[in-house]
Amino acid sequence: MIARVTLEIALRKEFDYLIQPGLEGQVEVGTRVQVPFGPRKVLGVVTALAEESAHAKLRPILKIISTPALVTPNVLALARWISGYYCCPLEIALKSVLPEAVRREQAGWRERLFVRALPFAGELPKLPKRQLEVWNIIEERREMPLQELLELAETTAATVRRLEDRGLVTVAPQISERDPYAREHILPTQPLALNPAQAAALAAVMKAMDGPNAERGARNVELHAAADRELNRQSPIVSRQSTFLLHGVTGSGKTEVYLQAIAHALAQGKGAIVLVPEISLTPQTVERFKARFSSGPLQTLVAVLHSHLSAGERHDEWHKIRQGRARIVIGARSAIFAPVEPLGLIIVDEEHEHTYKQEEAPRYHARDMAIVRGQLEGAVVVLGSATPSLESYYNCRKGKYTLIELPERVDNQKMPHVRVVDMRQAARKGKGPPIFSPQLKEAITQRLERGEQTILFLNRRGYSSSLLCPLCGFVAQCPNCSVSLTYHRTEQKLCCHICGETKPVPAICPNEKCRNPGIRYAGLGTQKVEETLAKLFPHARIKRMDSDVMKRKEDYRRVLGDFRIGKTDILVGTQMIAKGLHFPNVTLVGIIYADLALHQPDFRAGERTFQLLTQVAGRAGRGDVEGEVFVQAFTPFHPAIQCARRHDFAGFYEQEIEFREQLKYPPVSRVALLTLKDRNEDKVKFSADHLKREVENGLRGLKDLILAGPAPAPLLRAETYYRYQIMVRTRQMSKLSRLLAKITGALALPKDVTLTVDIDPMDLS
Ligand code: ADP
Ligand code: ZN
């Protein structure tokens, strides 16, 4: 027998090796092996088995790294899908589907010394006092880690060894599992009685889980054929019955629906994967899942996978899943590859979150992978959000997903009252735009007097500034692309980062009715807000939360802990504070500069603004007092801001999809972003022109092709590299992926110039 092995060292092909007689029967597809490669020994995964090989003189596999196979057939099919769709070699895709801690050559279990009581015949021999004390403990516990015994008995290993010499106990190494949540005390919870909207949502999901799709388990599918068919479709295939978009306002009880759907999967003898954004993986979130399944007839381990675990913890959590002891997995992006078998349900909470997209190769989107995997496994997929992505909502409209809505908060709490403050008026009165409008200042004063808490939010993401007139709200726009132009300080130019259009920097506001000479570059940070706040309210207790001050996990916990118990009056922060926080005493949320996200050079700027405003506003009024939200904006009538004010997702969708239709942006089309970088700008520019010609030639067959660029990337210079981009748009992404793989494979770039291909990019910078 012959094994086709994909090696870890990137070589873009499979190599044949002999399975010698001693290893027969142990090597299957998905097994990790060590093989000779030239003079070296390298690791790889068996990706196929064959009867014969085209090559003579095959070398044998050296050893098997682990049995059973680490990569299950469905996960291997998923890796192949990723490799094809995202234009990356299979070995890169395989790296993503197994955590580093699991891929290591040495088994990563932690062994500790355990003491075990042995049965003895007759009377207990007479023991010295110390030894008797130790014996009494171990006789009762029967078995425990040596270290714990020593601490409990306040003794030394020598005493325990005496007992071993007498034949009363053994001391031997044994695997001891690491449990990252061992310290949390978790009280079991029971399912809540659902309200009618929740009950209808659960019923729809359960019906799909019981449907014919569920019968179509993994083994009935010709996997590779399925993955190939998948690749030939325009988008990840979906059957209407098996993918749901659960659109529920913040606090509408989505999590309770997830929990009860998972219980149904367990009752069917299947497992579930729950994806949440990394930032939401707080102990409280994890606890809600552990608490529900820690006892009762459906009891199972809940494994947790995320980047804050130690390598050892991740190893143990992963193997608990592989061994079938943990049938529920909750984790960030890469948990979509967890080896749950059989898999009945996949939940993607906050499905609109951009962190589901991996920003290095393989550049997969975990939400889309959830859908592909659901299809491969016959599992039902539930995407949940208060602010769905345009992509997912569009798929509902097209009949690919089923939309379920939870329009109200569970406890009859009202949605917060949102007021939009026109900052142009505030700017006209003073010398320039103030950070705080008089209305917001007044509202903060009231909260301080009443002992209620305030959250102030400033979205300071992005690198380059846009040109903004503080009097009329004018923002310089590209005539072709409907994104704002970016100010390049060194060249004194405005530049479009999609098509490359450039314009001179105006000395006065170009709006004919305005002509303000005080046109300026937007840019303000949370630190400035905090400083100004401290001057305005010298007695207020203020804390700031952004990536500059939050260096460690403890910082985050400490600041939030202080806020929770009321030690802080005002919390200032970036999107770090936008998500999932639930503080009943917060009655005021201020959004300092709502336009900031709006003027990013990105066609999703409006969508991001809407999502952000809605999520931040959702932090207010989670207690008994109704919440109030102030949105300060220079373009107060922008649809993203007005729709967020009215909590009107559908309204926002309608106008936004029209814009995407007109300019052929996703979800109406699909995008591939090609980025070239090098330290020498001329070299990058030259290479980009060359690439453009190759792409033009190679993609001629695509009917609905739109090519834009080359243009300097919004983040033109990053870590001393210059970056240029070409944006390709089409509806036929699978075809485009294949053609791009061909073009880039044959491309001769100057030395040091690197090319990245990002399919369905989320970050255009
Ligand atoms: P979402 O995930 O939609 O933001 P959650 O699931 O966190 O909402 O629910 C908000 C709160 O309402 C939670 O404290 C939850 O325990 C509670 N809750 C959810 N469903 C019910 C219900 N049917 N009856 C009573 N309380 C509920
Ligand atoms: Zn343009």
Image (cartoon, rainbow, N blue to C red):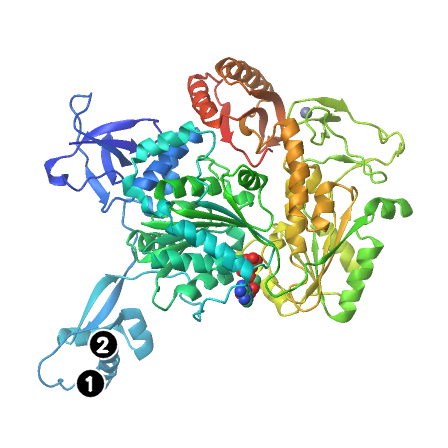
In the displayed structure, 142 sits above or below 650; it is below
Local SS, label 1: loop
* Quarter occupied by the C terminus: top right
Residue shown at 25% from the left, 83% from the top: 133
In the displayed structure, 510 sits above or below 297; it is above
Residue 114: name its quadrant. bottom left
In the displayed structure, 743 sits above or below 386; it is above
Ligand 2 visible in quadrant: top right
Tell me the kind of residue under disc 1: Pro
Mark 1 C-beta closer than 8 Å to ligand 1: no
Tell me the kind of residue under disc 2: Thr
Classify 10 Å Cα crowding around label 2: few (below 14), some (14-19), many (20 and above).
some
Left or right of 172? Residue 497 is right
**Residue 295's spot in the image, x, y percent?**
37, 68
Labelled disc at residue 159: 2
Local SS, label 2: helix
According to the picture, the residue beneath numbered tag 1 turns out to be: 128
Residue shown at 39% from the left, 35% from the top: 93
**Residue 234's spot in the image, x, y percent?**
47, 29
Residue shown at 70% from the left, 67% from the top: 625
Classify 10 Å Cα crowding around label 1: few (below 14), some (14-19), many (20 and above).
few
Viewer-side residue, 437 vs 123: 437
- Per the model, the C-alpha gap separating discs 2 and 1 is 10 Å
Are the residues at dot 2 and dot 1 in contact (C-beta closer than 8 Å)? no
Viewer-side residue, 99 vs 611: 611
Left or right of 275? Residue 71 is left
**Residue 352's spot in the image, x, y percent?**
56, 45
Residue 138: name its quadrant. bottom left
